[in-house]
Amino acid sequence: MRSPYPLIPLASAGAFLTGCASPQNYVFDTAGPAAASLAHLGWYGLLAFMAATFVTLCLIGWLAFRRRGTLAEHEPISSGDRGQSWILIGGFAIPFAVLSFLLVATMDTLNAFPMMDGHEQLPDIVVTGHQWWFQLNYEFAGHPDQNVQTATEIHVPVGRPMTLALRSGDVIHSFWVPKLHGKVDVIPGQTNFIRIEADRPGTYQGECAEFCGEQHAHMRLLVVAQSPEEYQRWLTRMRDDAAQPTDPAVRHGEDVFLSQACALCHTIRGTLANGTVGPDLTHIGSRLTIAGGEFKNTPGNLGAWVTSAQNLKPGALMPNLSTLDGPDLGALISYLESLK
Ligand code: CUA
């Protein structure tokens, strides 16, 4: 029978390479300067780790395969000057060199992140973590009439640094968009500032990176990086109130929304709905995802979310509106999807 050992490196290579093509290959496939400097540090760490592992494995190999009898039976391996110098070199000098190198590289990387506090400048976007979704407020100093509120989907113009103020409405969360920036905690009673910038257009996935309760794993966000013109168009559209429905079926959907519990928790600007417990739904139809980034925004998913949120994301504040009959539900979904 042939030895199976040659297959081991092949099999493990497969396991490593599957990571390369996945959207989870976050750390090294960066799309912005902050993430790029973290990726550099990652490479330094990886190289230092590989070098240390290689030297260690060589020493173990040398011990395992050296010719028997090169040391006298009665001579313990660590005795004498040779044993002492091995301890000094391997136990002190090499770790000291590797750790010093990593310390300098880390300090260098930290210097690349600007320290900011609230007095220096106003943020472009205030991000507020809630259980279990991110609220987003675009703020324009001196022009509060131009402010925009949305959820889960951060739009940014390519090539322009955007200052984010991170706050929490309840417990500790963590804001992480790996292709653009490292993790930053979102802490009640404190505002943390970061600057993100996207080098190229794209949709970058983010998530909450701090355990924040039952649905922590389902608290996501998207960063949509667009050309400055597209971004401006998006912003202008977001400032508009919701369009008045003209289609009778869609108008019935609006009536359903306003007469059900929906309006107590959600805002749709331009209507009487002004709840602040859940996400602002003024332009829900234009968003790529629903339920804190958990599901694609399709009529089917939206219907399932409205009627069975507690089955899909148990513990979330969204109740099951299971009393809606088929026609009312259909009209409600058509109305929400019309809010572009
Ligand atoms: Cu929010 Cu984990």
Image (spheres, helix red, strand yellow):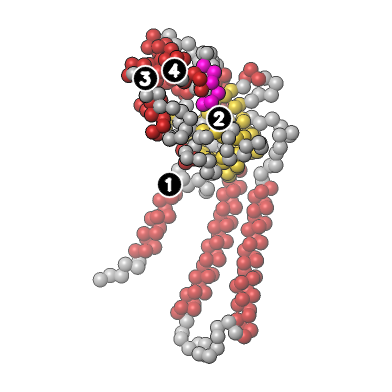
Q: x, y percentage for residue 78?
A: 58, 82
Q: Residues under labels 2 and 1: Cα distance?
A: 31 Å
Q: Earlier in the sequence, mark 1 or mark 4?
A: 1
Q: Amino acid at mark 2?
A: Gln
Q: Which region of the structure is painted magenta?
A: 273-279
Q: Secondary structure at mark 1?
A: helix
Residue neighbourhood size for the residue with mark 2, other residues' Cα within 10 Å, grouped as few (<14), some (14–19), many (≥20): many
The residue depicted at 55 percent of the width and 66 percent of the height is: 52
Please say if 300 is above or below 190.
above
Q: Earlier in the sequence, mark 3 or mark 1?
A: 1
Q: Nearer the viewer, mark 3 or mark 1?
A: 3
x 62%, y 35%: residue? 167
First of labels 2, 4 by sequence position: 2
Question: What residue sits right under mark 2 in the picture?
Answer: 135
Name the residue at the left extreme.
1
Q: Is residue 248 left or right of residue 205?
A: left
C-alpha gap between disc 2 and disc 4: 23 Å
Instruction: Assess whether mark 4 and mark 3 are in contact (beta carbons under 8 angstroms).
Output: yes
